[in-house]
Amino acid sequence: MSFKILLFVGFGGFFGAILRFVISQISLKILPMGFATLMVNILGSFLMGLILSYSSKISISVEFKMLITAGFLGALTTFSTFAYENIVFLEQGKIATFFLNIATNVCLSILACYVGVLIFK
């Protein structure tokens, strides 16, 4: 791991975190809790599949690949927020919402990643 790659990851993370924050703020005004996390996880999973599949077909520098995957997409998607939101659903007694949220996030994120991979297969 080089300092150069760390800078690229940090740079990508800066923009991924900003986009995640903007999506969350907009979503919270119009959608119930949990939807912003679902949206960024599906989007991030799709983009991860797309980028990694595409990068296997063309020459992309390790730095750029890390900027997008570990940096931008790593900051855009989140598992800690996903976990916390599920704890809140449990504490509120929303058991069906708890299970639906987990199933939806996991299944749609995996599906989105697979669709991203298929685009360049």
Image (cartoon, rainbow, N blue to C red):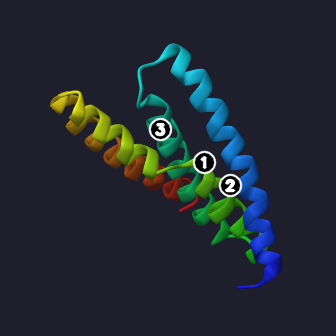
Please give the name of the residue rendered at 74% of the width and 76% of the height, measured from the top-left corner.
62
Who is closer to the viewer here, 2 or 67?
Answer: 2
> As shown in the figure, which amino acid type bears the numbered disc 1?
Leu
Note whether residue 59 is visible.
Answer: no
Direction top: furthest residue: 30
Label at residue 62: none
Please give the name of the residue rendered at 71% of the width and 41% of the height, measured from the top-left corner.
18
Task: Compute the Cα span from label 2 to label 1.
Answer: 6 Å
Q: Kindly state the secondary structure of the residue where label 3 is placed.
A: helix
> As shown in the figure, which amino acid type bears the numbered disc 2?
Phe
Task: Compute the Cα span from label 1 to label 3.
Answer: 9 Å
Where residue 98 sits in the image (x, y, percent)?
24, 36
Name the N-terminal-most of marks 2 and 3. 3
Please give the name of the residue rendered at 55% of the width and 15% of the height, measured from the top-left corner.
29
Where residue 39 sits in the image (x, y, percent)?
49, 35
Where residue 105 sits in the image (x, y, percent)?
36, 43
For residue 26, above or below residue 53: above
Find out whether the residues at labels 2 and 1 contact each other: C-beta distance under 8 Å. Answer: yes
Task: Compute the Cα span from label 2 to label 3.
Answer: 15 Å
- The residue tagged 1 is 76
Note whether residue 37 is visible.
Answer: yes
Q: Kindly state the secondary structure of the residue where label 1 is placed.
A: helix
Name the N-terminal-most of marks 1 and 3. 3
- The residue tagged 2 is 72
Where residue 85 sits in the image (x, y, percent)?
37, 38
Label at residue 37: 3
For residue 73, above or below residue 57: above
